[in-house]
Image (cartoon, rainbow, N blue to C red):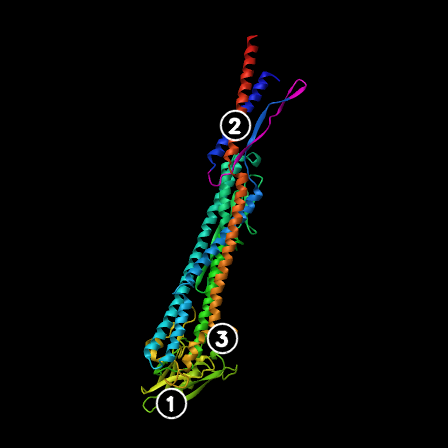
Amino acid sequence: MSLYGSIRLAANSLRATQIALQVIGQNIANAQTPGYVREELLLSPAPTQRYGGLLLGLGVQVKGVIQRIDHFLEHRLRAAVSDRAGGEVQEYALVQLEGLLNELGDTDLSTALTNFFASISEILNQPESISVRNLAVLQGQTLCLQIRRLAARVQELRDHLNERVRSLADDINRLTDQIRTLNIRIAEMEGGDASSSDAVGLRDQRLAALEELAQIIDIRVEEQQSGGVAVYCGGLYLVSEGVRRPVEVRFQSDGGSALAFIHLAETDSPLETTSGQLAGLIRARDEILGGFLRQLNEFTQALIYEFNRLYSQGQGLQGYSRLVSSYGARKTEVPLDQAGLPYPVRNGSFRLIVYNAETGQTQTTVIPVKLLGGPQDTTLRTLAEALNAVDGVSASVGLDGRLEIRADSPDQALAFAEDTSGILAALGLNTFFQGTSAFDVEVNPVVRAVPATFASSLSGIGRDTELAAKLAGFFETPLESHGGASLAVLYDRLVSQVAENSSVSRALADSARVFEQTLRSQKLAISGVNLDEEAVRLIAFQRSFQASARYIAALTELLEILANL
């Protein structure tokens, strides 16, 4: 080999060690930089040169600078990030729900239920006391307030999660656009040769963007020959090298609420995500909180209807001079079981009692409610006509479909008994509660205004407390409409399911966090910067640089000798 070839060999060596020292310095400088992936210099033997009959090497050449990364591990880590993010959202929702229930406090729903039924028991001890009945009404109002407040707060939390779903569309679009831009820049810098990347800094940024996107939705990433990546969510691609497809928010109505869902704008297809914040938010919103509200509504409707069915059989210390039903029928000319009443009606009858305070006489009339599927079935109109036929009673149906019943004389009072059809509870006549859900349950304004009308007797106005005894034990009474389960059982199911789900959610979230941390530790071992290792490599290349420099010095002396000959 000529001296010039040797000098070229030495120059290659110096250049390689100089670049190696720069890469090591880059690693050391970014040892604490979040998301930084350790860089590594790729070296290979330089091309050979023929010298006479020999093939002699020209030293070393730099092929490129690459990231020390395990792509399979990155794929597993992104999946773990998605699982952890989705689990944490559900954990958050259940923790908040437990806090709203506040079962260990003194202001929880179970305390309000206990106080309400206990206040009814006091009527047994002081049946003539209006103040005791007023206390029962006040406790009923407190119970209704607790139910409405719980429902409203759960709905507020659900609306908050719904708003977070809506905002995720902007985050997805921002990240996919960032990944698309980085794809283009990486392809331009690398020239299609990802094995000798000059775009390691850009690749770090893209890895960080992909991980942030994986927190929102579960994604599949495939690297292309150009150095760009394709990003898929389910069977839909969001990014393909320099092309991205934006997402948009679509709304679906759900009981008066507009629930947000994220769809691919181009095809209007919903994102098929099973983990990540988006999936976690939708599950928390629709299954955890939505399911709880459905159960709370079921419990509240059972309380309203079943309690009213029993309550409507009785009489208080005084009767009514006028009553208007709490609920109106949407159709007044069709059988009552098809009239659009909020609660069911069946074939049966009830007794209308007209009490004359001046004479002390009581007139009882059986009002039939025929629902046999024939032309003679009772409608709201025919029911009003049957009531009108009772001496001393007037009834009419208003434009809003509500039934009004009045005593014709101020000396007369109305009461009800023995309703086997459920029509009184369905219409809201002689009832304690009114409403159709946990959001609007309240005590009937008639009872609130006149606590003396609180029904406690089954044999006549102010005669006994037989009904009060049944109402006091109603919380534990099996309900035929719920398969024999009592209100106590329904409430226990409501609370215990939240507690069980919360425990399971915590365990799953903790497991996901531990697994993610395990994978991060593995990634750190491969892609993280170890200062001790970098120091050893630094010394090694420093010595290599010094040796190359001495080699050049020796060649320089040889050239001087050659020049002086």
Residue 289 is at least partly visible in this image? yes
Q: Position of residue 400 (x, y in %)?
A: 39, 75
Q: Is residue 324 left or right of residue 529?
A: left
Which disc, if any, is residue 539? 2
Residue at the disc numbered 3 = 479
Task: Examine the rendered structure and indicate whether residue 45 appears above or below residue 431.
Answer: above
Mark closer to the chain start, 1 or 3? 1
Q: Is residue 121 left or right of residue 35?
A: left
Of the residues tagged 1 and 3, which is closer to the observer?
3
Q: Residue at x 55, y 8 (%)?
A: 564
Of the residues tagged 2 and 1, which is closer to the observer?
2
Q: CA distance from mark 1 to mark 3?
A: 33 Å
Q: Position of residue 508 (x, y in %)?
A: 52, 54
Residue at the disc numbered 1 = 362
- Label 2: element kind: helix
Which disc, if any, is residue 257? none
Residue 217 is at least partly visible in this image? no
Task: Examine the rendered structure and indicate whether residue 475 appears above or below residue 320.
Answer: above
Question: Residues in magenta?
Answer: 32-55
**Residue closest to the eye, 366 or 546:** 546
Q: Residue at x 57, y 27 (%)?
A: 61
- Label 3: element kind: loop
Q: Amino acid at mark 3?
A: Leu
Q: CA distance from mark 2 to mark 1?
A: 111 Å
